[in-house]
Every structure is written in C-alpha cells, then in structure tokens.
Image (spheres, rainbow, N blue to C red):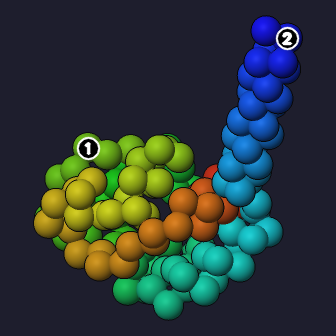
Amino acid sequence: MRYSFRMFFLACLLSLNLAIAQQQVVANDVERGEKLYSRRCGACHSIDVNRIGPKHRGLLGRTAGSLTDYDYSDALSHSSVVWTKETLNAWLENPQALIPGQKMGFRLKKEDERQDIIAYLVRLKD
C-alpha cells in the first residue's frame, strides 16, 4: 500500500512539473515577441504607419476595423470584434475563422510565437 502511494505521489509531482514546463514554453516573452513581430508581421504591418496592413500601436482595446486612416475589408469594418489577448490569439491562429471574409491570409500556427507577439503588442500604447 505504501509503495503505491509513493508511486502515485511521484507521478503527481512529475505531472505538475510537466505542466509548469509547458506553461513556461508560452512565456509571453516581450523581447522575443518584438523580434518575431519584425520577422512575421513586419512585411505588411508597422507599429506606427499603415502599410499593406494597418498600424498596430494601441491595438489592444480597439474595435477591429476602426482606424479611420486605413481601408479595411467590409468584413473587418463591420465586425464587432474588440482586440483583446484572446481575440488576437484567435486572429493570429486563423483570421478567416474569427472574421470570415477579411483579407489577411497569414496564419501563425505556433502558440508560443502568438503569445510572445501579443505580449509585445500589449506593451505598445498610443
């Protein structure tokens, strides 16, 4: 009986350590997020200037498609999505699933990369 309790306890500790390690993979690394933003997003987006895609400073809390100086798709312009960490994660993972008919074709499959880019964007204020 004691042996099985010890094995159960060790298995629980191992599971807890694995869970902690997995959370650390999605660590919201702002510095890494800045580099990833430059590599993954920078061809179309800028922090302060509209390009192929809209500028991103002050993105969190803003309603999707609401910048007056950018020509959004009708789908985005008529969307009621507000940019939060959760909606940005869904958007970066699959923009078409979040807002059907929008025009961004890029998807970011890796969760840790999405979280790091979002951590970087959170730091950018108007």
28 or 3, nearer to the observer: 3
- Whichever of labels 2 and 1 marks the residue nearer the N terminus, that label is 2
Quadrant position of the C terminus in the picture: bottom right
Q: Is residue 66 visible?
A: no
At x 31%, y 46%, the residue is 81
Would you name the residue on which mark 1 appears?
A: 80
48 vs 96, left or right, is: right
Q: What element does badge 1 sit on?
A: loop
Residue at label 2? 2
Q: Pick whichever, 26 or 50, lies toward us.
A: 26
Where, by quadrant of the figure, is residue 5 drawn? top right
Q: Is residue 64 above or below residue 4?
A: below
Q: Residue at x 23, y 75 (%)?
A: 103
- Above or below, comparing residue 67 to residue 49 in the picture: above
Up-down relation of residue 66 to residue 4 (above or below): below
Q: Left or right: 74 with respect to 126?
A: left
Which residue is at a point 75% across and 27% down the rendered structure image? 12
Residue 75: give x, y in percent of width and height: 16, 61
Which amino acid type is marked by label 2?
A: Arg
